[in-house]
Image: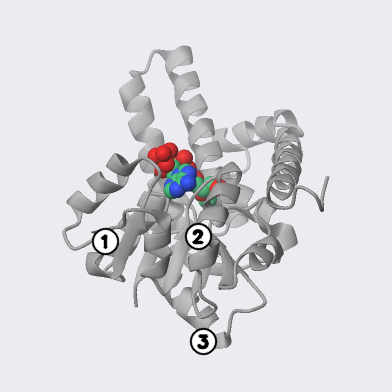
Amino acid sequence: MIYGFIGTGNMGRTLIEAFIRSGKLKPSELIISNRTKSKAEALAKSYPGLRLASDNRETVRNSDVFFLCIKPGEFRNVLDEIRDAVREDQIAVSITSPVMVADLEAWLSARIAKIIPSIANAACAGNSLFIPGSRLTRENRDHLRDLFGAISQPLMVEEVHTRVASDLACCAPAFMAHLMEKLADAAVEETGLPRETALSLVTRMAEGLGRLLTEGGFTLETLQERVAVPGGITREGLNLLQKDVGPVFNELIRLTHAKYEDDIEKVQNSLFPKMKK
Ligand SMILES: NC(=O)c1ccc[n+]([C@@H]2O[C@H](COP(=O)([O-])OP(=O)(O)OC[C@H]3O[C@@H](n4cnc5c(N)ncnc54)[C@H](OP(=O)(O)O)[C@@H]3O)[C@@H](O)[C@H]2O)c1
C-alpha cells in the first residue's frame, strides 16, 4: 500500500514523521510532493527510501491513499491539477476543516475522508477527528482508523461539529500553551522567579496533568477537588478564576466559528464560482 502526501508543511510533515516514528509506515511506502520542492527534498533526505514526486499528479498516480495537507485557499489549484489523475478506487484524505466532504466528492472520483489531526499526534497522543465520506467502504474506514490509531485516538465526528471539535483537539494545545506561558510570566513578574524555572515548572506540571487525566484515573472535576481542599490556597485561586475568567472561552469559540464560516464561503466560491456566491 502506498501513501501519498501533497503538501509537506507543518502538518504534512508532522503526519509523515509520526507515521514513520510510530513504525506504522515505512519511508518506502510514502511518496510526497510540495509546491516548494526544497522542503519536500529535505524531508526525503531525512528518511531514505521516501520517494519524491516531481509533481502532485505523480504523487496521486503512484498512491493508494493520498493526503491533501494544504491550506483551504490552495485546494482549487491542487484539485484542478490532480483531478484527471485520480481513480475511483483511491482514498483521498483532506486534513482541512473548512473544505466540505461533499464538495471534495463532487470534485474527485476517489473515496473521500476528512481526518483532522492534532499537533498532539506528533507525540502519538491526542485525538484525530474522522469524518468519513459517503463512498468509503467499511473496509476503507477500518483501514483509516487503524492507520490513525497508530498515532492518535481517532474519533468519529459529525461534519457539523468539525470546527468545535477542532477547537478542542487541535487548537487547544496552542491555547493551553498560551495560558501556561501567561501563568509562568505572571509568576516571574510578581515574584522575580527566574523565567526559565517558571517555564520548566509549568511544563513538567502539564506532563503530569496529562498523565493523571489519561492513565491516573482523574477527571478534570476530581482533579480540581483533590488539589483544592476547602480553606486551602488552591481553593482561593480557583475561586478567583471562577469569578474572573468570565466569558472569554465562549468568545473564543464564537470567534473560531465566525472565521470558519468565512473560510467555508471562500473555499466554496473558489471551488464552485458560478454555483455559489
Ligand atoms: N497546524 C495544525 O496544527 C493543523 C491541525 C489540523 C489541521 N491543519 C490543517 O492542515 C492544513 C495545512 O496546514 P499547515 O499548518 O501544514 O500549513 P503549511 O505549513 O502552510 O503547509 C501547507 C503546505 O502545502 C504546500 N502547498 C501549497 N500549495 C501547494 C500545491 N499547489 N502543491 C503542493 N503543495 C502545496 C505548501 O508549500 P510551500 O512550501 O510552497 O508553502 C506548504 O508546504 C491546513 O488546512 C490546516 O487547517 C493544521
- Mark 1 or mark 2, which is nearer to you? 2
Q: CA distance from mark 1 to mark 2?
A: 29 Å
Give the secondary structure at mark 3.
Answer: helix
Question: Mark 2 — residue?
Answer: 82
- Mark 3 or mark 2, which is nearer to you? 2
Q: How many marks?
A: 3
Question: 10 Å neighbourhood of mark 1: few (<14), some, or many (≥20)?
Answer: some
Question: 10 Å neighbourhood of mark 2: few (<14), some, or many (≥20)?
Answer: some
Relative to residue 203, is residue 129 drawn left or right? right
* Residue farthest to the left, as pictured: 48
* Residue drawn at 44 percent across, 71 percent down: 65
Near-viewer residue (41 or 261): 41
Please name the amino acid that badge 2 sits on. Answer: Ile
Note whether residue 135 is visible: yes
* Residue drawn at 82 percent across, 53 percent down: 275
Q: Quadrant of residue 239?
A: top right
Question: Mark 3 — residue?
Answer: 139
Please name the amino acid that badge 1 sits on. Answer: Arg
Q: Give the answer, above or below, for where 93 lies relative to 182.
A: below
